[in-house]
Image (spheres, rainbow, N blue to C red):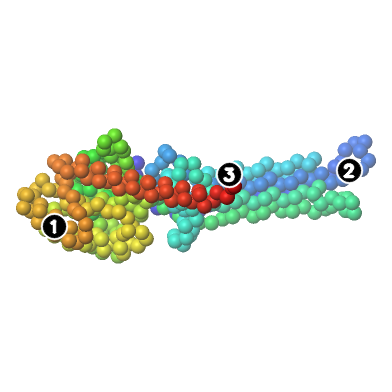
Amino acid sequence: MKFLDLAKVYIRSGAGGAGCISFRREKFIEYGGPDGGDGGRGGDVIVEAVDSLNTLIDFRYQQHFYAGNGQHGMGSQRTGKDGEDKILRVPVGTEILDEDEETVIADLTEVGQRIVIAKGGNGGWGNLRFKTATNQAPRRANPGQEAIERTIWLRLKLIADVGLLGMPNAGKSTFLAATSNARPKVADYPFTTLVPNLGVVGIDDVEFVVADIPGLIEGASEGKGLGDMFLGHVERCAVLLHLIDGTSGDPAGDLTKIIGEIEAYGGDLAEKPRITVLNKIDTLDAEERAFLTEEIAAVAEGPVMQMSGVSREGIPEVLRALREKIDEDRLRHRKAAEEADGEDTPWQP
């Protein structure tokens, strides 16, 4: 299945059916009167988050979605049939943006979340509705409300606990393949990873989700390389795992470049907890490891861990550090939710 994280779709809700002008004409009934029914209501366009999808590829082949129109009212006080709703099923983590690609209409982060993105028009009243004591034979009815037509963007941001960062060939895909059942492409040339990958990683009987995105290079915020188009997939992560290639020749410089691109991206990405790891230590001797770790720590302004995705040296320690950061983030969110619930609870004696 191909990966697609941005799609433009055109939607239209259903128009309401027109009301009916009709009069009752039956044998042996001396006084007839109006009996025109109301028009049916138009269908809504609904976006729903489901658990079985992880890409927006379906919206590459179909971009137009129309809800059903309401049926016109009929005589004998018959109301027209309501139009059918149109439901767009999207992966969890999908943002719905307005046509300007900036205004966020909704963010679907939980399974089963729904939002009506275009409401169907109400059906028009039939002439029976206009009957009064002074106007017992009204010859008027309302037309149904018109449909709502709009263009929206769907943008998928993967929901993961850990986001992998690093230059091309920093060993992100190797780490994901070594710690999970995911099988990302691994090769010895830059930009092996072209689309984000997800993997479920376990340590000490605890599992969490890791997202691997294509590598960043200097100038990614200006569109160089694959740009920063995939950084949105690590916005929701609890912690960032920054892998640095120990064989690159300038690991400290690589760290500086990535931090600069994250800060240029904006949002709160640069403020997220980050674990810095010197990768590929299987190719370094003890003296080189100590020197590079000290050099990187000066730039990172914090501790630097060591790891090798090939020999698996240091991987358990890195996974435990990630789990600790994830637990801290979940505890922080739980406390915030409890405080919010406490504020909403009315005082009781």
Local crowd size for mark 2, using a 10 Å CA cut-off: few (<14), some (14–19), many (≥20)? few
Looking at this view, is 95 or 202 the one in front?
202
Circle nearer the N terminus (1, 2):
2
Judge whether residue 181 can be spotted in this image: no
Q: Amino acid at mark 2?
A: Gly
Expressed as whole percent of the image width and height from the top left, the position of residue 111 reads: 46, 41
Residue 314 lies, with reference to residue 205, above or below; the image says below
Q: Which mark is in front, 3 or 2?
A: 3
- The residue that disc 3 covers is 85
- The residue that disc 2 covers is 32
Judge whether residue 263 can be spotted in this image: yes
Local crowd size for mark 3, using a 10 Å CA cut-off: few (<14), some (14–19), many (≥20)? many
Local crowd size for mark 1, using a 10 Å CA cut-off: few (<14), some (14–19), many (≥20)? some
Circle nearer the N terminus (1, 3):
3
Q: Disc 3 and disc 2: Cα gap in Å?
A: 37 Å
Q: Secondary structure at mark 1?
A: helix
Expressed as whole percent of the image width and height from the top left, the position of residue 329 reads: 35, 49
Residue reaching furthest front?
349
Looking at this view, is 153 or 108 the one in front?
108
Q: Amino acid at mark 3?
A: Asp
Q: Secondary structure at mark 3?
A: loop
Q: Where residue 294 is drawn, which disc sits there? A: 1
**Left or right of 82 on screen, residue 55:** left
Residue 288 lies, with reference to residue 266, above or below; the image says above
